[in-house]
Image (spheres, rainbow, N blue to C red):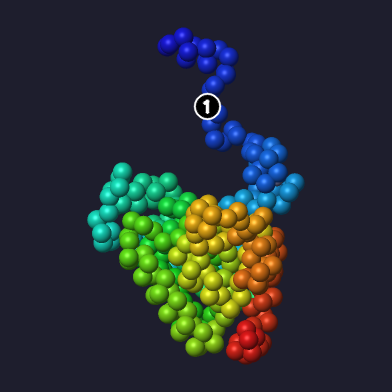
Amino acid sequence: MSWFDTFIEKTGIGKKVPKAEIIWTECKGCKEQIYIAEIEKNLKVCPNCEYHFRIDAKERISYLINPGTFEEHDQDLTSADPLKFKDQKKYKERLKSTEKKGYSHDALITGSGVLGDHAVELSIFEFNFMGGSMGSVVGEKITRSIERAIEKRNPLLIVSCSGGARMQEGIFSLMQMAKTASALRRLSEHKLPYISILTDPTTGGVSASFAMLGDVILAEPGALIGFAGPRVIEQTIQQKLPEGFQRAEFLLEHGLIDNVVHRKDMKQTVNKLLSLLKNTPIAEAVA
Ligand SMILES: [Zn+2]
C-alpha cells in the first residue's frame, strides 16, 4: 500500500463515498444542499425552490400512470446501425454499453396504460440513453404508438426529454421528424387527442417535429425548450438573448405552449384535459 493509500485509509480524506451512502445533493436551482430523501418524497422537485430535477422514464410512468396498468410495447426494437457509424467508439458498442447501465434498448419507452380515468397510449423519453436522442427506433416506436392509439381509439400522450436527432444515424434520424408528423396527421384525421408534455430539455429535431404538434402542449416549470441552444443563437445573431429565453415560462408568455404545469399537478391536469376533450368534438375543442 502506498503512503497515499495509507493516508486515505487512516484519515478517510479523499475516500470515495459509495453512491448508496450519498444522502445530500446540491440543487441546481437554489444551490442549497438538499437531503435526497426529501427530494424523492417530493416527486424529485426541490422543496426549497421548486426546481424540477430530471427523472427517468420509469419514474415518469409511476408519476403519471395508475399503478399496475402499464403494459410496455416494442421493448426489443434496436437500431440496425445503417451508417456503420464510428466516432471515438463504434455506435453499436455505444448502444450496448448504454443498455448495460440498465436503461431500455433505446431512448424511448412506449406502452398502454390508464391515466386517472382514461386509457392512453404513452411514449416517454429516457434521457439517460444517449441524451434521449431520436434515431430510427425512437421514431418507429412513436409511430407505432400513434397507430395503436388510432386502432384502439385512445388518446396519445408523449413526454419529451431529448437533445434532438441522433447524429450517429444521420439522415435516418431526421427522417423520423417527417414520419412521426405524418402519423400525427392521421391521428388528427381520426379526431383523437394528442397531449404533448415537454420536459427539460426538449430541443433539436424533437422540438421541431411531434413535440410541438400537440393539440395541447404542456411543459414542466423551467424546462429548456427550443431548436438550437442559446449559445449558438447568440453567436449567430451577435445579440444578447433576453432573460429566461427558451425556458417554459418564456414560451408560455410568447404563446408557443398552452401551460406550465408543476410535476405534482401533471397527472390531474392531463386527466381533466382528456375528460374535456372526450366530451367535446375535437375539432371544436382545439380550434
Ligand atoms: Zn432548490
- Outermost residue to the front: 238
Return the x and y of residue 121 as percentages of the image width and height.
52, 73
Whether residue 140 sits left or right of residue 69 in the image: it is left
Whether residue 145 sits left or right of residue 64 in the image: it is left
- From the viewer's side, name the closer residue of 131 and 20: 131
Whether residue 249 sits left or right of residue 11 in the image: it is right
**Is there any visible trace of residue 266 in the rendered image?**
no
**Is there any visible trace of residue 97 in the rendered image?**
yes
How many marks can you see? Answer: 1
Quick check: 122 above or below 82? below
Question: Quadrant holding ligand 1?
Answer: top right
* Res 242 quadrant in image: bottom right
Return the x and y of residue 236 as percentages of the image width and height.
49, 57
- From the viewer's side, name the closer residue of 34 and 10: 34
Return the x and y of residue 98 as percentages of the image width and height.
39, 48
Residue at image location 45% in from the left, 76% down from the top: 181
- Outermost residue to the right: 48
Residue at image location 52% in from the left, 16% down from the top: 8
In which quadrant will I find the C terminus? bottom right
Task: Rate crowding at label 1 as few (under 14), some (14 to 19) or many (20 or more) other CA atoms within 10 Å.
Answer: few
Residue at image location 67% in from the left, 55% down from the top: 243
Residue at image location 62% in from the left, 50% down from the top: 53
Quick check: 104 above or below 28? below
In which quadrant will I find the N terminus? top left
* Res 195 quadrant in image: bottom right
| Callout 1 secondary element | loop
Quick check: 116 above or below 131? below
What residue is disc 1 on?
A: 16
Q: Amino acid at mark 1?
A: Lys
Return the x and y of residue 170 as percentages of the image width and height.
33, 61
- From the viewer's side, name the closer residue of 130 and 21: 130
